[in-house]
Image (spheres, rainbow, N blue to C red):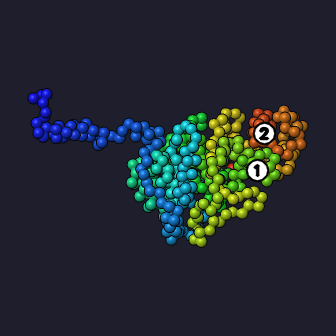
């Protein structure tokens, strides 16, 4: 009997028993906790793709037009990523580089084309939207996912206003934002804790760049939490200023020096203005004019605070003096550095410049960013630098910038 053929129906019975046994064994995997690889990817900031549909440019434009009906008077010009091709390009740029991939804070996602593209690549996204009309669509997407997306009503470029007490959304404070997204402060020497993506508003572009750099040097606002990495679209003319070489008559400015001393600046991508959707009713591009510098593109630039920024004499406590010194020196870029120092009653005999091997007749725009840092450190160490009036002036400058935004 054992060596013979099984009785009729035995094969089917065996198959049913085997299927039941397999189902019982697999049930913990199918119905229990997620597999270990899934948990590992989550802990590393990588999520399984939710397979979201990414709307086309026409659908995104329709959504922006619908929000126009709820647009409040005085709403400023905004640009959006509406093209799936551009969204994929930006997504690849944001995920470039080695090392850990921290949470991504997306500023003003609008129709959410880039948001969906990032989610499909397993990126954990915090969407900080400043227009309440876009919130229902984003919140619906948030509710369909398992924690991969967090939607917050707020304006990144209006964080930490110089006011006391409560503020009205979308204005908010950075400590509340970071508490909400669950990010704690890390040492300056640690890895980047948060990446930020956004398109800087056109009207106040220069003011916003200065405000971000002031906060970086003082380790205030978002930089109280560590070396926050900015991935921002800026106009081509501002990119040229940020990356200018010493001696460039048109582009080398105080913003150049402060930006290059404080950050590693990397160009990730250049895109024509026409690739972006605006919130103008006439669908215009509203490209800002530029008299001296090229301005045919928006440039995606990565600003990573330098890990060694505060390892020398320069510290958050005296950084405002450094910034104001640079701004004063380059206010008249053709002037000689020695004349500027003499006007401050510093280095009247030229000894300091000789020690730094800086030519006596050097124009202020001919000094490299690192030269300005060395000059500042030498002045700080020489005990000749009475920085009280510098500090008062720069504090007024910072206050004015906050009030303008």
Q: Position of residue 255 (x, y in %)?
A: 72, 49
Q: Earlier in the sequence, mark 1 or mark 2?
A: 1
Horizontally, residue 311 falls left or right of residue 164, namely right
Residue position for label 2: 371
Tag 2's secondary structure? Answer: helix
Instruction: Quadrant for the N terminus, please.
Output: top left
Q: Residue furthest front?
A: 4
- Give the left or right position of residue 17, taking residue 152 as reference: left
Element at label 1: loop
Q: Nearer the viewer, residue 380 or 229?
A: 229
The answer to the question of whether label 1 and label 2 lie on touching residues, with beta carbons closer than 8 A, is no
User: In the rendered image, is residue 343 in sight?
Assistant: no
Q: Residues within 10 Å of mark 2 (few under 14, many from 20)?
A: some
Q: CA distance from mark 1 to mark 2?
A: 14 Å
The residue that disc 1 covers is 253
**x and y, in percent, of residue 4 in the image:** 12, 30
Please state which of residues 214 and 262 is positioned toward the viewer in this rendering. 262
Residue at the image point whose x is 63% and y is 36% from the top? 307
């Amino acid at each position: 009997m054992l060596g013979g053929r099984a009785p009729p129906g035995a094969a089917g019975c065996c198959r049913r028993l085997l299927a039941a046994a397999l189902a019982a064994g697999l049930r913990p995997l199918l119905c229990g906790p997620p597999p270990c690889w899934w948990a590992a990817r989550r802990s590393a900031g990588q999520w399984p793709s939710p397979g979201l549909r990414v709307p086309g440019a026409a659908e995104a434009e329709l959504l922006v037009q619908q929000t126009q009906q709820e647009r409040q008077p005085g709403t400023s010009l905004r640009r959006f990523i509406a093209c799936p091709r551009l969204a994929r390009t930006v997504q690849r740029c944001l995920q470039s580089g080695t090392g850990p991939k921290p949470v991504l804070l997306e500023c003003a996602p609008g129709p959410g084309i880039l948001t969906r593209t990032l989610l499909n690549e397993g990126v954990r996204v915090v969407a900080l939207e400043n227009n309440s009309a876009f919130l229902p669509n984003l919140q619906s997407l948030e509710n369909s996912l398992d924690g991969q997306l967090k939607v917050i009503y707020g304006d990144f470029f209006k964080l930490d206003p110089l006011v006391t007490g409560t503020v009205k959304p979308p204005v908010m404070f950075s400590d509340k934002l970071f508490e909400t997204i669950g990010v704690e402060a890390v040492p300056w020497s640690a890895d980047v804790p948060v990446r930020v993506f956004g398109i800087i508003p056109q009207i106040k572009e220069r003011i916003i760049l200065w405000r971000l750099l002031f906060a970086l040097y003082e380790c205030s606002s978002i930089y109280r939490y560590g070396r926050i990495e900015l991935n921002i679209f800026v106009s081509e003319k501002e990119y040229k200023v940020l990356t200018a070489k010493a001696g460039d008559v048109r582009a080398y400015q105080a913003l150049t020096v402060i930006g290059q001393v404080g950050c590693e600046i990397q160009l990730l991508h250049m895109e024509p203005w026409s690739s972006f959707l605006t919130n103008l009713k006439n669908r215009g591009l509203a490209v800002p004019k530029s008299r001296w510098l090229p301005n045919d593109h928006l440039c995606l630039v990565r600003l990573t605070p330098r890990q060694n920024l505060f390892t020398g004499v320069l510290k958050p406590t005296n950084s405002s003096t450094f910034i104001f010194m640079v701004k004063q020196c380059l206010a008249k870029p053709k002037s000689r550095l020695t004349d500027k120092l003499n006007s401050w009653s510093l280095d009247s005999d030229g000894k300091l410049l000789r020690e730094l091997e800086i030519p006596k007749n050097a124009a202020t725009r001919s000094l490299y960013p690192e030269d300005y840092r060395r000059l500042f450190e030498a002045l700080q160490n020489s005990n000749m630098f009475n920085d009280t009036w510098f500090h008062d002036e720069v504090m007024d400058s910072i206050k004015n910038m906050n009030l303008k935004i």
